[in-house]
């Protein structure tokens, strides 16, 4: 049993290592359902679940998806927000085109990617930012947590930069020593912030989703 299955498991845990203990079944019920229903990823069911719970995808809204490949969340966003919505996705990997969706290839940590994201919507502003970003895992807990934390900080900064007042952020996160600091950071920019677990998350993945609503208006800049 020390064959391929065992080796794959080593690389699939959360930054806190929680996934290493779980019974990882890559082709679980959500995976099979996604295949049958034409979604590009099983992650689509996470967005369907959380978007309904928190009303995250307004019809005709401007929606930005950070870490969008292969595009399951983009499919859900396009279907729920409808034909008048503006849906923009960005990922390090090239995403196959989707009707009615703008897909960009880039690193969300680069200024160039943020500029491209702004150019992709009228006025450069969004109503909703989604982020299902996963860092490349090294297997070393401290450095994996640092990478995940860097992506979370970057996501909150991007959301604060592009969201309209009242806007919403949905962000994947992993429980770690940085969680409380991340919550404080999010609360400084949003009136309502909470962490939620989703039924569609893989058992033992250690992932949670931060839902931040009501982006606070920016302080006037007198400089
Ligand atoms: C779990 S997948 C997203 C799945 C997607 N929500 C879906 O429904 O299909 C995470 C993605 O984050 C992307 N990613 C990680 N770091 C990134 C970065 N710095 N900039 C852009 N994308 C990044 C990865 O390339 C990967 O495709």
Image (tube, rainbow, N blue to C red):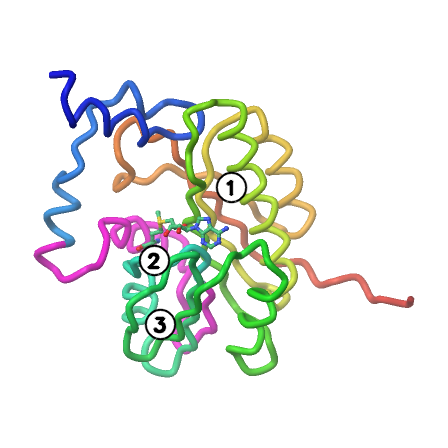
Q: Residues within 10 Å of mark 3 (few under 14, many from 20)?
A: some
Expressed as whole percent of the image width and height from the top left, the position of residue 52 reads 33, 56
Residue for badge 3: 81
Identify the residue position indicated by label 2 in the image. 69
**Residue found 60% across the figure and 49% down from its top:** 154
Would you call the spot at circle 1 few (<14 residues within 10 Å), some (14-19), or many (20 or more)?
Answer: few
Left or right? Give the position of 51 relative to 34.
Answer: right
Task: Pick whichever of labels 3 and 2 is earlier in the sequence.
Answer: 2
Note whether 144 is above or below 63 in the view shown. above
Tell me residue 84's x, y (percent). 38, 83
Q: CA distance from mark 3 to mark 1?
A: 23 Å
Magenta region: 35-64
Left or right, 162 with respect to 223, comes to: left
Label 2 SS = loop
Q: Nearer the viewer, mark 3 or mark 2?
A: 2
Closer to the eye: label 2 or 1: 2
Q: Is mark 3 within 8 Å of ligand 1?
A: no
- Is 62 covered by the magenta stretch? yes
Location of the N terminus by quadrant is top left
Q: Is mark 2 within 8 Å of ligand 1?
A: yes
- Mark 2–mark 1 Cα distance, whole angstroms, equals 25 Å
Instruction: Check disc 2: other Cα within 10 Å, few if <14, some if 14-19, many if 20+.
Output: many
Mark 3 vs 1: CB contact within 8 A: no
Which residue bears the numbered disc 1? 194
In the rendered structure, the answer to whether residue 203 lies left or right of residue 131 reads left
Instruction: Tell me which residue sits at (58%, 48%) in the image.
Output: 192
Q: Secondary structure at mark 3?
A: helix
Mark positioned earlier in the residue sequence (2 or 1): 2
x then y, percent, for residue 181: 64, 33
């Amino acid at each position: 049993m020390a064959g391929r299955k065992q080796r794959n498991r080593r690389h699939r845990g959360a930054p806190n290592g929680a996934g290493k203990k779980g019974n990882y079944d890559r082709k679980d019920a959500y995976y099979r359902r996604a295949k049958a229903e034409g979604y590009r990823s099983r992650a689509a069911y996470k967005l369907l679940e959380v978007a309904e719970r928190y009303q995250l995808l307004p019809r005709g809204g401007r929606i930005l998806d950070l870490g969008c490949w292969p595009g399951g969340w983009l499919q859900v966003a396009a279907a729920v927000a409808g034909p008048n919505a503006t849906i923009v996705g960005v990922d390090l990997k090239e995403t196959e085109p989707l009707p009615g969706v703008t897909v960009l290839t880039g690193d969300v940590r680069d200024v160039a990617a943020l500029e491209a994201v702004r150019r992709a919507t009228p006025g450069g502003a969004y109503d909703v930012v989604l982020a299902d970003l996963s860092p490349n895992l090294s297997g070393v807990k401290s450095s994996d947590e640092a990478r995940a934390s860097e992506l979370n900080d970057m996501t909150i900064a991007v959301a604060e930069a592009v969201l309209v007042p009242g806007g919403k952020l949905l962000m994947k996160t992993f429980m770690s020593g940085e969680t409380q600091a991340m919550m404080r950071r999010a609360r400084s920019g949003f009136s309502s912030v909470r962490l939620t677990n989703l039924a569609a998350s893989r058992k033992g993945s250690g992932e949670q989703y931060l839902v931040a609503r009501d982006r606070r208006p920016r302080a006037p800049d007198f400089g």
